C-alpha cells in the first residue's frame, strides 16, 4: 500500500483511512512514513485497527534528520515519543535505527549543500549527491557508537517493533 501508484503497489490509499478490514493484517512495516503523515496519531489508530490480535508492526521514524518533503514532512520522534505514540501496543523492541554519526552527516551534508549552492536548487542537489557519497563511509563509525547506551541521545532515527495485544481468554 502506498499514497502514490508506484510499480508493485497493490493499494493506493491515505494511510490514515486504510481500506482494510478490522483485525485483518498479520504485520505492517511503516518505514520512513509517519513523518510525512499530517495526522500520525490517526495513522497509528488505523494500524491498531487493521492488525490482527498478536499482529506485529515495525516502525522506523527520523529523530535528528533534515526536512525532506514527500510531499510534506511534519514530525520527528525521540525514543520515548514513538513509544508513547504506540502505547496501545506491547513494545517488543525499541532503539536507535541509525546512529549519531549518521545524524551528524545528514545535517552536515545538507548544510554544505546549502552553503555551497548559492541558492541554486540544481547546484544544491548535485553537491548533496556528491557529498552524500563522499562522506557515507564515516557512517561506519556508528557500528561502534550504537554499542553505547548514550547513542540514544542523538540518533538519526528510531525504530520500534510492537505487537497488538491478544484478548485475555480469562476475560
Image: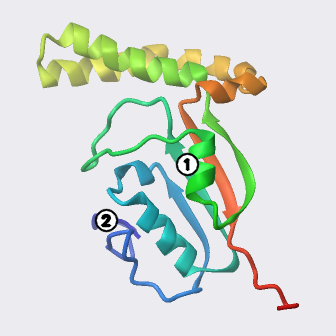
**Of 125 and 71, the residue lying toward us:** 71
Question: Which is nearer the N-term, disc 2 or disc 1?
Answer: 2
Q: Residue at x 38, y 70 (%)?
A: 16
Relative to 38, 155 lies left or right: right
- Residue 112 at x, y = what percent? 32, 11
Residue in the image at 33% along x and 20% along y = 110
Q: Is residue 68 above or below residue 147?
A: below
Above or below 62: residue 49:
below
95 over 105 or under it: above or below: below
Q: Residue 168: which numbered mark, if any?
A: none
- In percent of the image, x 59 and y 86: which residue is there? 23
Q: Tell me the number on the disc at residue 60.
A: 1
For this orientation, the residue located farthest to the front is 171
| 116 vs 126, nearest the viewer | 116
**Residue 141 percent location from the top left of the image:** 66, 17
Q: Residue at x 40, y 77 (%)?
A: 18
Quadrant containing the C terminus is bottom right
Quadrant in the rendering for residue 69: top left
For disc 2, the neighbor class at 10 Å (few under 14, some 14 to 19, many from 20) is few
The percent coordinates of residue 97 (x first, y second) are 62, 38
- Element marked by disc 2: loop
| Gap between marks 2 and 1 measured at Cα | 17 Å
Numbered tag placed on residue 3 in the rendering: 2
Percent x, y of residue 129: 33, 23
Q: Is residue 134 or residue 108 the one in the foreground?
A: 108
Residue reaching furthest right?
170
Callout 1 secondary element: strand
- The quadrant in which the N terminus is found is bottom left
Residue 33 seen in this snapshot: no
Amino acid at each position: 500500500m502506498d499514497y502514490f501508484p508506484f510499480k508493485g503497489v497493490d493499494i493506493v490509499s491515505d494511510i490514515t483511512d486504510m481500506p482494510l478490514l478490522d483485525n485483518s493484517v498479520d504485520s505492517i512495516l511503516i518505514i520512513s512514513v509517519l513523518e510525512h503523515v499530517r495526522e500520525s496519531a490517526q495513522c497509528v489508530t488505523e494500524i491498531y485497527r487493521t492488525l490482527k490480535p498478536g499482529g506485529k508492526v515495525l516502525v522506523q521514524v527520523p529523530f535528528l534528520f533534515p526536512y525532506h518533503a514527500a510531499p510534506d514532512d511534519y514530525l520527528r520522534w525521540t525514543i520515548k515519543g514513538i513509544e508513547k505514540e504506540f502505547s496501545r501496543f506491547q513494545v517488543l523492541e525499541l532503539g536507535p535505527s541509525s546512529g549519531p554519526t549518521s545524524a551528524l552527516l545528514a545535517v552536515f551534508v545538507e548544510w554544505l549543500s546549502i552553503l555551497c549552492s548559492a541558492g541554486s536548487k540544481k547546484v544544491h542537489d548535485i553537491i548533496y549527491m556528491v557529498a552524500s557519497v563522499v562522506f557515507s563511509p564515516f557512517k561506519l563509525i556508528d557500528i561502534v557508537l550504537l554499542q553505547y547506551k548514550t547513542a540514544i541521545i542523538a540518533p538519526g532515527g528510531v525504530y520500534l517493533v510492537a505487537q497488538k495485544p491478544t484478548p485475555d481468554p480469562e476475560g
